[in-house]
Amino acid sequence: MKKITILVIMLLGSYTFASADVGLRLGVAGAVGVFEAAGSEKDVGVNATETTKSSAAKDGDEILVGLGSIFVEKTLGFLPGPLSRLSVGYDWVVHDVKTGSQNRTDTDLDGAANAGDAGGNSQIVTRKASATISGINTLYVTANITDWLFVKAGRVEMDVKSTDSNSLDGTSTYGSASIDGTVYGIGIMNETENGFGFKLSWEQTDLDGATLNHKTNANNSITIESVEGATAKAAVYKAF
């Protein structure tokens, strides 16, 4: 996340607002889409005698999300030929995104390998996992195919924090991780003579995986194997 922010500051810092035509667009955007996530949990028992791996989203759990963001773009009209149709941009989602929760019921064995062993006690444990996604930042390039049709490609980064609660010890927390991936899309746009414009686009996002380790039990972890989704996005902006 910090890498993208620093790069944007360096990029936009090389231009000045004092110019009458700086080729900047400042705007806000809203998007709605469906994402599909796949992952698994590694859970080693207290006595390290049993390891279970569950796929909470083995077949792909779909999550409906809504995103609100602000963005800035710099047109590259000073470049020669077709390169003058390029723009670079930075988009920042201004809020956190909370995922849905996933429940799993286990039999917890205390002091015995099997519930039927002498001296062994068993309890039914319901574990509930959820995550909060924050700091969604995207650095991208757009290319105008025509005056109204454009394509887009970029790199997105975000922070994921997961929690896992159960009926035995209250809340057991996993660590956080930064994940990144690619975004690409296609859209239409229109801009008036006084510099007000809008964009409508479809975007596909593919995120890499990550592993979140338990803070107190290094044997336990949650692995995010893949996240992918598509969004419909609408934006309005003012060009300077």
Image (cartoon, rainbow, N blue to C red):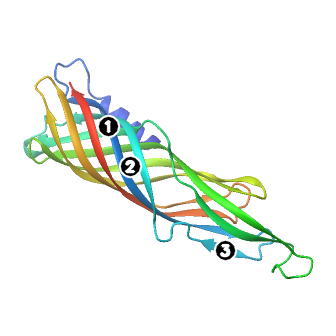
Identify the mark at residue 52; answer none if there is no mark: 3
Q: Callout 1: few (<14), some (14-19), or many (20+) C-alpha neighbours within 10 Å?
A: many
Q: Earlier in the sequence, mark 1 or mark 2?
A: 1
Which residue is more in the foreground, 97 or 209?
97
Dividing the picture into quadrants, the one containing residue 111 is: bottom right
Can residue 207 be seen here? The reply is: no
* Residue drawn at point x = 87 percent, y = 82 percent: 117
Q: Which residue is mark 2?
A: 156
Q: Position of residue 171 (x, y in %)?
A: 72, 52
* Residue drawn at point x = 70 percent, y = 63 percent: 126
Q: Position of residue 214 (x, y in %)?
A: 67, 58
Q: Callout 3: few (<14), some (14-19), or many (20+) C-alpha neighbours within 10 Å?
A: few
Q: Position of residue 113 (x, y in %)?
A: 81, 79
Identify the mark at residue 50; answer none if there is no mark: none
Q: Are marks 1 and 2 in contact (CB under 8 Å)?
A: no
Q: Callout 2: few (<14), some (14-19), or many (20+) C-alpha neighbours within 10 Å?
A: many
64 relative to 79 in the view: left or right: right
Which residue is more in the foreground, 2 or 91?
91
